[in-house]
Image (cartoon, rainbow, N blue to C red):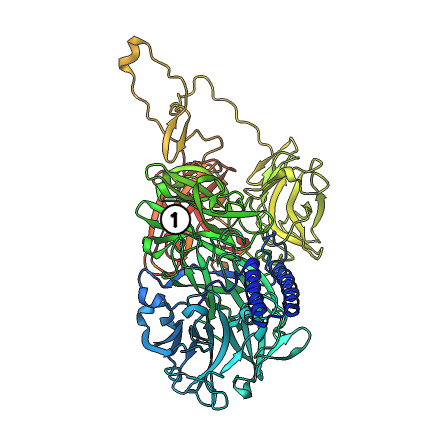
Amino acid sequence: MVFDHLKKYLENKKERLGTKLLFLEKKRQYLFIAGLMLLLALSAILALTINLANNKKSFNLQEKAAETTYNFQVEIGEEEAVITAARNPQISRFLDTAPPVVKMADGRLRIFLSESNTYAYTLNSSEDLGNVARWRSEGMVLPKGNGNNFDTCGAWLNSVYKDPNNPRHWIGWYHAEIRPNNCNSTDDIKTMAFVESFDEGLHWIKGTADHPYPQNQVIKPPEENLYLDAGDAHVIKIGDYFYMFSMGGVGGDGYHLSRSLVSDEGKPGTWFNYSKNDGWNQPGLGGNSNPIPNIYNYAVYNSYLGKYISIMATGRWGFRFNYTPSPSNLLSWQSQLIYPLVSTSTDSNVDRGGNGDRQDTRGYYNYAWIISPDGDTETVGQEFYLYYMKIFPNEGFEKRNLLRRKIKIHENRSTIFSKIPLIEYRKGNKTQTSTELPNPSENYQKTGYLGYLAGQRKEGFVPLWDCYIENWDDHMLTLGTLDPANPGICPTDPNASVVRNIGFIAQTPRDGANLPLYRCFDEENLNHFVDTTPDCRGKKKEFLMGYIFSSFETPSCPPPPAVIQIGPHNCITNNKPSFTIIDQEDNCVPHDGIILIRKDVNGNGMLDNASSEDILVAGSGLWKENAFDPQTHEYTFTPAEPLADGAYIWRGYSRNTNNQKSLDNDFISFRICANPNYECSNNTCQIKTETPPSPPINSPTVEPAEPTPPDSTIISGTPQPTNTPTVKPAPDEEQNITPTPTTTRPTPTNSCLPGPSQTKNAYIPQALSSTWGVGEPLKFQANQTGILDKVDLYLSWKAPSSIEVKITDEQGNNISNTVRQSLSGTSPGKWITFDLTTEPLLQSNKNYIITFRKNYGDLYVHRGIYWNWAYKTYFKSCQ
């Protein structure tokens, strides 16, 4: 079977038509007819040109940034190997079409694979689809034809329908080919033909009593255009009709629709093509038809969306999710890119046909099909599997592989239509991080997830390229723009080759992509890798690549309640204080820049219209770009006028796309106490107390405090002394000096915690909700000065797991050791304690970060109400 179904170039079409016209000219020997056919050829070439241009337009091959807001999202799972050329060489050669899968009367499945002939395999259950070792071979069940018949070069079973009145009676349609030179030419004629079986597909009969073989064709192109194909079809039943999606037809490459009444059983002579001019009135045998934009042949009904869908899997055009806006109209489809092109749509080394020199090929993808987890190929739900044939770069067609991805549909409104997991694989001291499975022959093993990439280009997102440095056996992720004239050369290193575009990364935090991704380098092993923390596992950090999604889900915004209990106020003596807030709702509602302060008139810590009034902040309440930190989503503001003493609450407002104002859940509660006769005490304004008098000179001697050691800085848990000059004692005193104990902690700048204490963020066990996985740092502000003894996090895990936790400052410098906890079994949620060995001194009102890293397993760190982290911190006195 020819592999270049969707990639026939205009030049090949011109050459093919020219060859056929020359043949007719010589045969008929009429100059007039020759001239007429030449005119028809030019018209056909023009039509092909227009059609190909339209196809490119409909498939958006220019990859313009997508800005549409979608009503649902597509989650693409990791790539899994089902059949590989390395492990299953005998069966892998049969991966030459999208195979039909049919559920038998006893609940088992039967799958049909083809390579010129069709072979059957029996599976005990749908779970065996992912385990080829449990497939039982039934041998050849549909042979190709003989002599000079239409199926002499092959019979590939494409679709099967099970008779509801007789479950052992199966109706089928197969793809047939005939080619010159004993099937050694690529100049093939493709048609579709009818078969039926009365033993659940173990034996197939070509034709019927009324249309015996070889008169069993159901779809074929007109006689004068036989080489424009009518094959590679898939049939679905909708109501009273069978609908056949076939490739080819008059007008050039594309997918066409034909239909037959179910009561006619899809037999020869009962099929009619759809054409724009004649509707469903063109005969399937030799009639005209028009391609339907944005469709692929393997269509199924999705009950979750209430739409018909199909997914086209190619390297040159990417993976495209096609769907009908209306389930009752198969003539109108929409198409969205869900997984990127390997390189460019014009790269001739992607999806390249033929068995010639394959050294510089960049992969081949084809024959995508969809099936539900329980083995249904007619109707799928929210979750289903996408299967496809893939050939890895630089390998030939004898090394075909069957791979699959789990697809999940989410009914979310988002500007990001699809996301793909970014996964790390390791082999010894070599790392490959990709959204694709490494070639199984290379024996890489998955070590964990890093996050998600966008599957289509969007404003603010750029391609992330997997490049290969052959001399180092090194996979290196990089950014940059590919040269269309040299799509095989890495954008940032001419000595490296392009493997593929693995997805799109945000240049700045946006649209929920806020997890930083750093490129790192292991100089000892000449190995590039990426990490979500700047320490790069102790290796060299090269640069910040951008921002990825820490999970598929974007946090949902909780509805703002009418009254919110804030709690005790923070007392401030400055009547024009500056505040910094973190915009936690940036992923949910587009902000228009309205910020205000509300005065808590009653001083009760309540935010409602009856007890508060609005006071604008600096800049007439507008958000200031220069006050926004894109990496931390922090906003800093100062009131326009001095604030009178009293209680205040700072709130944020947003406007959505319908210009409706909504209240954010960011807030700061504070009390101004600027009157010189008052002071802040216990978070309230109180009359200043008199300063106690100094002790008399002759009072008992007070033992002096321990000398303050020189300043030091903690880097990765190791004290690094500063360049403070050393004072050398006098010679006669040198031998009598007692060494002074030193500490790695800086001198406290605020009053120190007098004793043990525990603080916790806003959470209640009933409101704990799972985050999208481990990886996003937890930022918190110390509300007191003290030594951090330990931290509790609320975790859940679905398999034995482990997690590493450490504390850093805002600059990313380590100030504690890394604590590792092994988690056995499973847990729906429990508090886990991380006892720090290197206990850092935290300063009051300063920000710190708890970073955590998952080593394996499905592990989640939880949040509480209003998306606050569920955590506890324990302090010890620093005195």
**Quadrant location, the C terminus:** top left
**Looking at the image, residue 160 lies above or below residue 433:** below
Q: From the image, tell me which residue sits under label 1.
A: 432
Percent of width and height locating residue 506: 54, 47
- Sort mark 1 into few (<14), some (14-19) or many (20+) by Cα contacts within 10 Å: many
- Viewer-closest of 21 and 5: 21
**Residue 771 appears anywhere in the view:** no
Residue drawn at 29 percent across, 19 percent down? 738
Q: Amino acid at mark 1?
A: Gln
Count of labels shown?
1
- Viewer-closest of 348 and 32: 32
Percent of width and height locating residue 388: 44, 64
Percent of width and height locating residue 731: 30, 9
**Looking at the image, residue 693 lies above or below residue 185:** above
**Quadrant location, the N terminus:** bottom left
**Residue 824 appears anywhere in the view:** yes
Residue at the limit of the structure toward the right, as seen here: 620
Residue drawn at 38 percent across, 86 percent down? 199
Percent of width and height locating residue 90: 31, 67
Left or right: 714 with respect to 555? left
Q: Secondary structure at mark 1?
A: strand
Left or right: 636 with respect to 210? right
- Viewer-closest of 829 and 671: 829
